[in-house]
Amino acid sequence: MMHWFGNYGTTMGFGWVFMILFWGMIIFITLSLWKKNDYGKKETADEILKKRYARGEISKEEFERMKKDISE
């Protein structure tokens, strides 16, 4: 018995896989471009100083002294 759609049912069965791959690539490219723009942003001296203090690279006294130097 012939189906109403003929033989298309077997070949179109994998169409959803290609659709998922297509949208996955679109999302990946969009996120890659979005993150690339974030990496180009320059950090301020205050942000760098806070990160160094948080990592333990400098002591509290050094942090306060450097913060005072930056604000002047």
Image (tube, grey):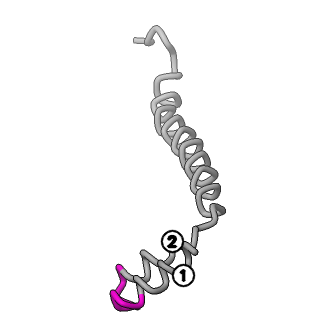
Viewer-proximal residue, 28 or 18?
28
Tell me residue 13's x, y (percent).
45, 30
Viewer-proximal residue, 25 or 53?
53
Q: Which mark is residue 69?
A: 1
The part of the image, by quadrant, that contains residue 22 is: top right
The part of the image, by quadrant, that contains residue 63 is: bottom left
Q: Nearer the viewer, mark 2 or mark 1?
A: 1
Magenta span has 33?
Answer: no
Please give the name of the residue rendered at 52% of the width and 22% of the height, measured from the top-left corner. 7
Viewer-proximal residue, 17 or 49?
49
Q: Is residue 54 left or right of residue 14?
A: left
Mark before the other along the chain sequence, 2 or 1: 2
> Identity of the amino acid at label 1?
Asp
Viewer-proximal residue, 49 or 6?
49
| Chain part drawn in magenta | 54-62
Is disc 2 placed on a helix, strand or loop? helix
* Mark 2 closeness class: few <14, some 14–19, many ≥20 residues within 10 Å: few
